[in-house]
Amino acid sequence: MANWVPLWLHKLGSPPIFYRFAGVVRPWALALAILAALAALYGGLVLAPADYQQGDAYRIIFIHVPSAWMSLFIYGAMAVAAFVGLVWRIKIAEVVAMESAPIGAAFTFITLVTGSLWGKPMWGTWWTWDARLTSELVLLFLYLGVIGLYHSFEDRRQGARAASFLALIGIVNVPIVHFSVNWWNTLHQGSTVRILGPSHIEMSMLWPLLTMMLATKLYYIASLFARVRADLIATESGKDWVRAIALAENGDRP
Amino acid sequence: MNPTRKRRMTIVISVVAAAVVAVSLTVFALQQNMNYLFTPSQVQGGQATQYQTFRLGGMVKSGSIQRSSDSLKVSFIVIDAGGAMPVEYTGILPDLFRDNQSVIASGRMDGARFIASEVLAKHDETYMPKELKDAMAKAHENKKIDEAAAKDPVQ
C-alpha cells in the first residue's frame, strides 16, 4: 500500500486486528447510541413543543428524518468500502461493504414506513409516486439487490466483488434522492435542516433531531462491527487466529 | 500504486462514470415527463392538454372554500403566481386543508373547472412552536397597522 496511508489504518486491514478493535469499540458505541437515543426521544417526545401547523403529529420526524439520513449515509459508506475493496482487494473493506447493506436496508425500510404513517394524516395519502418517495424506494431495492447478489455466489469473495460493483453503480441514486425535492415538483417538502444557511426548524426541535442523528450513527458502528466480527469468524474459520480465540474462549475443551 | 491496482481503479471509475452519464441522460430526457403536477397557469397555457387525468398543484385561494351543506362536496379556487382555477371535490379532505394551503389535486378537466378525485395537502419544511408562530403573526399584524398608519397621516 502507498506510504501516505497511516500505519494504524494499514494494520486495521488485518482481520485479527480488526476483530479485536471492533470488539473493544462495539459495546461503547452501543451504550452511547442507547443513551443518545433515549435523550433524543425524551427531548423530542416530551420537551419539544407541538408544531404550529401539524400539532403533535410532526413528532415522527425524530425517527423518520434520522433514518432517512442514515439510509443515504450508509449507502455512501458502503460505496466507499466497495471501491476500496474492488481496487485494493482488502478483505475487511469487502466485508464492511457487504455487512453495511442489511443495516442500510433496515434504515431505508424504517424511513419508508414512518414516512407512510406520517403521510396519511398530513398529506392525505399513504403513498404517492413522487420523485422523493420513488427514489427512496429504488434505494431500498438497490440495498436488497446488493444483499441478494452477495449471497447468490458460492464463493463469498466473488460474491462481494460482484455486489460491490452493483453498490458502486447504485451510488448514482444517492444525489437523486437528496435533490429530488429541488429538481422536480414533489408532494414531499424540501430539506428542513441545512448545513449551509439557517435551518427551518426551531432550536428546541432541532437538538433532539441532531442527537438522534448521532445515536443512529453510533448504532450503525455498533451493528456493523458486530456483523463484521461474525462474518470474519465465519470466513476465516480455518485460520490460526480464529483457532486461538476459540481455544481461549473454550479453555481446553475440544 | 502498482499497475494492477491502477488498472482496476481505471475500470471501476469508468464503469461508475458510464452509469452516471447514462442515468443523467435518462433523467434529463425524462425531465418533462416526470412532472408530478401542473400549476393552474401551466394548465391554462395548454401544457396538460395531452393528459386525460393529471395533478393540479397550487395554493387554495383565501376565502374561496365553499362547502355544500348537505353533502361532502366542496369547491375552491387553486391559484399560482399567474393563474387561478376552480376545483370541485367530493370526499374527505386532509387535516391541513385550509385557506392559503398548498394542495395537490388529481383529477380531470370539465370545461374550465377541474374535477378532483383526490386532494392532498402539501406542507412546507418549516417547524416551529405554535406560540412562536402566534407571536410572529402578531408582530406582523402590528407592523401592518403601523404601516397603514404611516401611509394615512390624517388618522
Image (cartoon, rainbow, N blue to C red):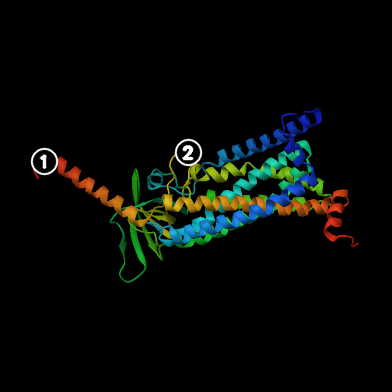
**Residue sitting at 19 percent across and 44 percent down?**
B146
**Numbered mark located on residue B47 in the image:** none
**Mark 2 against mark 1, which lies toward the viewer?**
2
Q: Which labelled disc corresponds to residue A196?
A: 2
Badge 2 amino acid: Leu
Q: Quadrant of the N terminus of chain A?
A: top right
- Looking at the rendering, in which quadrant would you find the C terminus of chain A? bottom right
The image shows residue B20, relative to residue A187, as above or below, that is: above
To the question of a shared chain for discs 2 and 1, the answer is no
Q: Nearer the viewer, residue A182 or A37?
A: A37
Q: Nearer the viewer, residue A140 or B139?
A: B139
The reply, left or right, for residue A175 in relation to residue B36 is: right
Residue drawn 26% across the image and 52% down it: B138
Q: Quadrant of residue B88?
A: bottom left
Asked if one can make out residue A135 in the rendered structure from this viewpoint, the answer is: no
Amino acid type shown at disc 1: Pro
Other-residue count near label 1 (Cα within 10 Å), few / some / many at <14 / 14–19 / ≥20: few
Q: Chain of mark 2?
A: A
Q: Position of residue A204 (x, y in %)?
A: 43, 53
User: Farthest residue toward the right?
Assistant: A254
Residue A176 can be seen, yes or no: yes
Task: Give the SS element for disc 1.
Answer: loop
* Residue of label 1: B153
SS class, disc 2? loop
Residue B119, placed above or below residue B3: below
Gap between marks 2 and 1 measured at Cα: 44 Å
Which residue appears farthest toward the left when viewing the image? B154
